[in-house]
Image (spheres, helix red, strand yellow):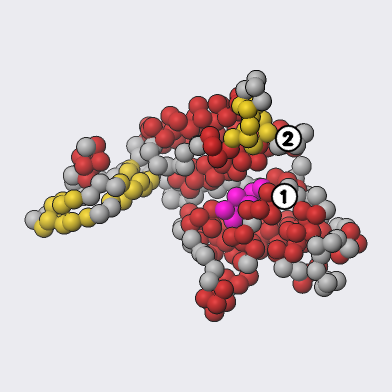
Amino acid sequence: MDEYNRLKAPAAAKISPGTLRWFTESSLGGIFVCGNHPISVRRITIEHHMTDAELRRLRGYYKSLSAQARTLAGLNNQKPEEVVDMTYFIAIKGVIDPLLREFPGIVPQLISGDVFSHDAGNGAYFRLQSLMLYLDQVVGRLEVELEDDSGSPVTQKREFLYIADKDLQALLCRDYQEVQRAFVAQCWKATIVLAGGAMEAILLDRLSTDRESSVSAASAPKKADLKRWQLSELIDVAVELKLVNSSIEKFSHSVREYRNLIHPGNEVRNKLAVGAEEARIAIEILNLLDRELGK
């Protein structure tokens, strides 16, 4: 009934310049009246406008979840663990549940089965990397929603201090902002291409610092020039040399063939998927790569 009431709200309702919007889909269907014309719909996208008070509360959720993401990243940096106890899961869920009650559909739900590892008798344990990826996804979506009064997206900054080439480091800092702006603008292809290019540059820089080990790795291609390696080859070698976690290899399918997206003909021939989910994963993998190499 609440959804029906929102649908009846005047279309000309005034929205103040600083308010934000988020969208949820309703399975509510039937006959609705638009002016004097009845229309039949199967599925409805409902647009919500935030008040200043809601915006402040959303920023609070964002800061809390960002802090928890940093806590897990710090735990992973100090002593990489495959699992964490239920304290961390409960803390995250304690923020996600009220967030979703107040802003339905704004971020994905935290489903215990997606991150659960095992029960050791003294309590449940959860996969650290899965929780970190989930928080990256949630924080990323909240960053998309949080806009300032000028309409510019609130983007996260990363410094890439481990990059040996300082000119490249500056370009990566710039491109990381562009990746997020492209995602905000729903430019999925641009997001994937920018994220893939950034990942390739990062891995090439890192593997070049120990070229001998890189070219002699079992997964290394026959090409001696690292600059001619594909992103997928750079990832495989970096995982083999234990420079990055194997989870990057598992989840990087959406960006491995990013170069083929540059030319529409290649995109058609290879039947590459380009959508919101692929773009989101591309950003998450870039974040994970930065976190792994920044230890």
- Look at 18% across and 56% down and name the residue there: 40
Q: Residue 246 got which mark?
A: 1
Between 198 and 275, the one lying in front of the other is 275
Which x, y percent locates residue 284?
Answer: 60, 50
Q: Amino acid at mark 2?
A: Glu
Which x, y percent locates residue 194?
Answer: 60, 62
- Which segment did they paint magenta? 281-288
Q: Farthest residue to the right: give it.
A: 212
- Mark 2 lies on residue: 81
Which x, y percent locates residue 114?
Answer: 55, 40
Between 213 and 46, the one lying in front of the other is 213
Q: Residues within 10 Å of mark 2 (few under 14, many from 20)?
A: few
Question: Which element is circle 1 on?
Answer: helix
* Residue 93 counted in the magenta span: no
Say if residue 222 shows up in the picture: yes
Compare marks 2 and 1 and give the one earlier in the sequence. 2
Q: Residues within 10 Å of mark 1 (few under 14, many from 20)?
A: some
The secondary structure making up most of the magenta span is: helix
